[in-house]
Structure formats: C-alpha cells, structure tokens
Image (tube, rainbow, N blue to C red):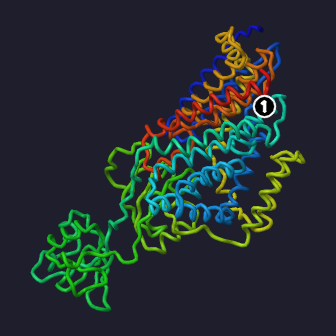
Amino acid sequence: MQAITPDAHGIAVLILTAVALFLFTRDNIPLESSSLAILIILVAGFQLVPYEKAGEVLLGPIDFFAGFGNEALIAICALMMVGKALETTGALQPLANIVSRAWSSRPVLALAITLVAGAILSAFMNNTPIVVLLMPILVGASLRAKFPVSGVMLPMGLATIIGGMSTTIGTSTNLLVVGIAHDMGQHEFSLFEWVLPVAIVGGVALLFLWLVAPRLLPDRTPPMADTSPRIFSAQLHVREGGFADGKSLSEVLAKADGNLRIDKIQRTESLFLAKLPSVVIQPGDRLFVKDSPENLKLYEQLLGATLFNISDSEHPIDDQTPLTAEGQQLAEVVVTRGSPLHLRSLAAARFSNSYGLLPLALHRARAPSSQVTGDLNLIRLRAGDVLLVQGSREAIANLKESGSMLVLDGTTNLPQTHHAKRALFVMGGVVLLAAFGIMPISVSAILGLGVMIATGCLAWRDAVSALSIPVIMIIVAALALGTALTKTGMAGYLAVSFVNAASGLPTPIILSAFMLLMTIMTNVVSNNAAAAIGTPIAISIAQQLGVSPEPFILAVLFGANMSFATPYGYQTNLLVMSAGGYKFADFLRVGIPLTIIMWVGFSLILPVLYQL
C-alpha cells in the first residue's frame, strides 16, 4: 500500500476543514458567512504561501474559484429555478387536492399515499417546495380527521429525503457528488443508475415510516394550536369624572405605562382628532384601541372609561356581551431560509407595515421549551421559527399569495394558472433529455429554465428568489476544501489511514463503516459539505483497496443524504419540527431506527450489486 506523508499545506488544510465543519454547525453564524470566511482563508493562504514543488505551483488561489463555475453547481441552480416554476404555477396542486381528499375519508391509507407521493416527487425536484406544499394541507387535514399531526409531519418529511436519494437530480447533494466524481475522472452516473438499490431499501424504510413511526411518536400539540383570537379591536368611551377626562393624550398613555395602543380618537360622528401628545381628552371621546381582553378591561378601569365592541356602541362589554373579533384570523407563519424574515427582526423587515398583520407570539424551533421574553419585534428570527400573527382575512390571503413565506393553513389552494400544464411538460422534458443521455443534466436544466421564462411559466423575480445564497456558498467552499485536500495529498493520507485502521477487514465492512461515518457527519454538519469533502476521500479509499470507486462514491451519496436523526441535518427537518411541535428526542426516536434500516440495507445491497 502506497505510503503518503502529509506536508505543511496538507495539515493546514485538514485543520481548516475541521474548523469549517465546526462553523457549519453554528446556528448564530450565517452559513454563507462561514463559507465565505473559509474561501477567503484558502485563497489568502495559498496566495501568501504558494504550494510549490520543484519550482512549479501545483495549487494556486485561482483554483479555488473554480467552484463558482462547477457544472454541478450550475445544474443545481438551474434546477432550483425550474422547480420554482412548478411552485408558482400551482402545477402540483392537483396532487395536493387528491391527498387532501384522501385524508378526509381514510387517513391511514392517505398517510401511505402521502409518503409514496412525496418520495416520488422528491426524486425529480428539491424536496423543500414539496414539503412546503404538503405541510399546510396535512396540518389541516389531520386535525379535521382527528389524526395526530405529529404522526404525519415527520414521516412525510423523512420520506421526501428518501425519495431524493434515488436519482441524480433528487438533491443538490447527489448532483454535487456525481459532479465531483466526474471532475476526478470517474464514471459518469446516469439519471436512474442507482434507483434500484434505493427502491429496495427505501421501500422497506417507507413501510417503517407508515406502520411503525407514528406509533413511536408521542401525540405532540402543534406549537400554536390555540386558534382563539388574541388581539381585539374595541372602543373606550371616556366618562365624565374619569381619569381620562381633561387629561392630555400623553398623560393617558403614561397611566397605561405606555402600553396602550390607540388607533384613532373620535370626538363626533365626523370629527377625528390627530394623535398629538398635547391633545386633551374630553368626556364622550371614543378611543379606538387594540389589545388582549385582559389588558382592555384593565385600561377601562385605569382610565375611567367604558369598553365597547368596535362595531357595537350600545352594549358595554360584560359577561353577557363579550369582546368579538369580526373578520379577524390567526395564522402561523414559518420562517424559511430565503424568506424576508430569515435572520432579521420583525422591526427590520417592517413586517406589520408591509403585510398589515400583528405579531402575537413566537415559537423558537431550536429552543421550543424556552420562553420568548422582551419585544417580539426585536428578536432575530431563524429558520424553523413559527410566528403567530393576527389580521384580516384579506391580509392573511395576501401573505399566502405572495409566496414569500410559508403560512400553515390548508384552507387556501395554490394559484391555478393556464401555465401549470406547460410547466409540467417542460420539467418532464428536462428529466427525459437527461434520462436518455441526450444531453447532460446541466444543459437540459439550463434549456428548461430558458423555456420556462420564455413561455411565461416563470418570471425573473421568482427565478432569482429560488436561488439560495447559503447553498451556493457552502457548495463553493466545500468544493474548494475538497480540491485542497486532494491536491495537497491529504485526501490520500486520510484514505490510507482509514484503510490501515480497518486492515484485515473485508471490503464490504470497510464500505459499510465509511458510509456510517458519512451518515454521522451529515447529521452534524451540512450534507453538501459532508458530500464535497467525503467524495475525494472515498475515491482514494477505493484506489488504495484496488476496487471499483463506484460503490464508495454511492456510500458518500447515501450517507450524506441520511439526515434523519437530528432536526438540523436538513432544512425540511426544521420546517417539520415547527409544524408538528416535535422535540429533538422525536427525531432520535424515528431517525435512528430509520438510519439503521437504510445503512444496513445499503451495506448489504451495494456489495452484491458491485461484486465486492
């Protein structure tokens, strides 16, 4: 076996790789910032200390920019935008309607249909829009069918990850692994090359998710299941002799500790006063206010006023005449990566002014048991957080139709447009051209994108919004690290070390152990980072063992996709965690057995298929 001695550059790259993997796990540091920092360190380091042998520069800073033009990255970006067209045209809505109808009659069978449909769709497009499409429907349908939401959401999310493993274009991770392997001179995988092992192992996994997983999950209450209105609009009629009589507006607000929200002040049927601090309140004035029932009754006492419903000035609020919230609705909004609220506060995003909605409460995805204290508008929101908002039916409908945020409500269908069939036809063409080997997936995806835009299925605004800067940056940074590990010989050194540690073991056992290592890594860091770093090492291991690299490349691909055991392993896990009210332990309950099923299944079938 060839001996490899690491040099200073290789050791530095290995240390930087460890630092990168650590940074990628830090939620308080944006993923794109960590990726850019790693890229800058690589470029600056190899510029200041060139990697030379015999006077020849073997690896320069310019080489690390190659990731921006990598064929896999181009294909990923094009497919993101093509998939956005299916979302914006409502092309998948007929399937969603079928799923919704099935849930209303036979929920257990409907769960099976949902799992299979989600897995099949995920084989051809990113699973995030599929989960976004199905989540509102499943929440509403399961509540109506009195089927535990927690028994539905997590199995559905995990099923889409399984389906995404089955084709080259199923996930960005698949495209990345295949692209890196091709760049390193390996066999070019076709679209459906490994669909057989995934169908066999994934079929068993889907049965587990259908029949066993719901029994393992406790009946969790969604984080904001209480749908009673929280904020009411009302009138405070100023009484003669009460505290507010003759006081300035600033004094009235001070009496309520500055918490009283006054929308307008009405003196006569046609006269409304400006809300100036110096304006003097008189008997008979009507203060139009908004707050919780408890606070409104408190203000009534403090100000010596009488509380009335907004539309009823004849009957004071009491036990017989409670507060009402006519035309108001509650909605739960999930913060997703790329949404206007991601890594911003409500105040910075001007949420209330932009959408006409009032934020009421916040459920933090990564600390579900902690109490949110302080001003809700100043809290920096993260992916997976759920915001409870209240507003008019029109305002909530407008938020849904904007497509910029995920609203957890199944009452509104996605828009039906005459472009839906056209978008499906174009997407089918993209898949078929790649499946029959007529052209590479990167080329067919770019052509498909052009046709989508030319035929009106996709606007440039929607196309650009489909691109994820964090995904792009982490792929580029991970490709740069992979290049550095390979060119400095550190990938070969790690491969030799791994093979030496497993010396004497059969090749199938070494393959299985390596796949397990990738599975553990992907549940801790980004799956794209795990894939980009693991692929060159996998090829080096196969070369050291003198066997075909293909099963080891697939071991990276399958292992990097098994993001089942933690809510942070994959973006859709965070969405599902929020919608279903899950705890970290719930992912362990279902994710660990599912991971074992998939790992054992692939460990048995890959050696058979590749005759190891």
Q: Quadrant of the C terminus?
A: top right
Quarter of the figure with residue 195? top right
| Residue depicted at x 66% and y 52% | 467
Q: Nearer the viewer, residue 317 or 36?
A: 317
Looking at numbered disc 1 in the image, what kind of residue is underneath it?
Answer: Ala
x then y, percent, for residue 468: 64, 49
User: Residue visible at 85% across and 45% down?
Assistant: 440
Q: Secondary structure at mark 1?
A: helix
Q: Is residue 9 visible?
A: no
Q: Which residue is mark 1?
A: 181
Report whether 388 appears left or right of 403. left
Q: Which class describes the residues within 10 Å of circle 1: few (<14), some (14-19), or many (20+)?
A: many
- Rendering coords of residue 239 (x, y %): 14, 82
Residue 116 on image: x %, y %: 64, 50
x, y percent for residue 358: 39, 65
User: Left of 94 or right of it: where is 405?
Assistant: left
